[in-house]
Amino acid sequence: MINIVILISGNGSNLQAIIDACKNSNTTQAKLPVSIVAVISSNPDAYGLQRAREAGIHTEVLDHKQFENRQNFDLALQNLIDQFKPKLIVLAGFMRILTDDFVNHYLGHMMNIHPSLLPQFPGLNTHQQALDKGVKQHGASVHFVTPELDGGPIIIQAQVPVKENDSTQSLQARVLEQEHKIYPTAIRWFAENRLVLKNNAAHLDGCQLEQPKK
Ligand code: GAR
């Protein structure tokens, strides 16, 4: 069992999937062996805060609008996180660009989920980008966080087909459904000591994970 801190900014459906994976056990999957010691939101109105409270999880709000600059916010966030002594920081819809110092402090101990098949479509509006580009496959990626924005070693991806009549909303819903499966899987691997970041590469069960071509 490891302690994790989850960072959110919004709806928190990925947070919910992780909460559910901690509770449920079925015949194929044991409960996720993690303890969510805190959920921290950069947005006081994030619906995810309510989800956490309902699950009896400690919540904190660190409103980025109250800080003069990125450095100050990240320092305060780091101080707050470190009080909980987590082994893993999970970014679940945390809509902030992080300073290099913050990222390096948690190197190998912080993962993110991004709604695209990285390295395609880093940044924002990924579903619109996918529709504009006319790709046939879209999806989501879980990756270790490194100073390169959305550029850290990929741990797991899920693909979904793009349909002819897709809107950003319908595509987003199809991708989110997959996000809710792959994020608990990646966290499980980490919690079971099967997944590590070594020499800037993700290793699972001692083997370096192959990365998609740029
Ligand atoms: C998810 O689609 C996640 O991949 C994305 O925000 C959404 C949050 O949804 N993250 C990013 O775009 C990070 N750059 P949720 O709050 O319902 O989990």
Image: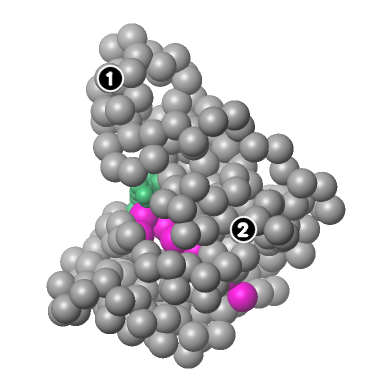
Q: Identify whether 188 is placed above or below 57.
A: above
Q: Position of residue 124 (x, y in %)?
A: 29, 42
Dividing the picture into quadrants, the one containing residue 93 is bottom left
x, y percent for residue 192: 75, 63
Q: Position of residue 162 (x, y in %)?
A: 40, 18
Q: Position of residue 103 (x, y in %)?
A: 47, 68
Give the side of residue 129 with respect to residue 22, left or right: left
Q: Nearer the viewer, mark 2 or mark 1?
A: 1
Q: Residue furthest right?
A: 206
Within 10 Å of disc 2 (Cα), the crowding (few <14, some 14-19, many 20+) is: many
- Residue 210 in magenta? no
Q: What amino acid is found at the position of numbered circle 1 in the picture?
A: Asp
Q: Residue 45 vs residue 159: left or right?
A: left
Label 2, label 1: how far apart the Cα atoms are: 32 Å
Q: Does 105 appear above or below 210?
A: below
Residue drawn where x is 45% and y is 26% of the image = 138
Label 2 is placed on what type of residue?
Ile
Going from N to C along the chain, the mark reached first, 2 or 1, is: 1
Q: Is residue 171 left or right of residue 36?
A: left
Q: Residues within 10 Å of mark 1 (few under 14, many from 20)?
A: few
Q: Which residues are magenta?
A: 87-94
Image quarter hosting the C terminus: top right
Does residue 91 belong to the magenta stretch? yes
Q: Which mark is residue 187?
A: 2
Q: Residue at x 38, y 68 (%)?
A: 99
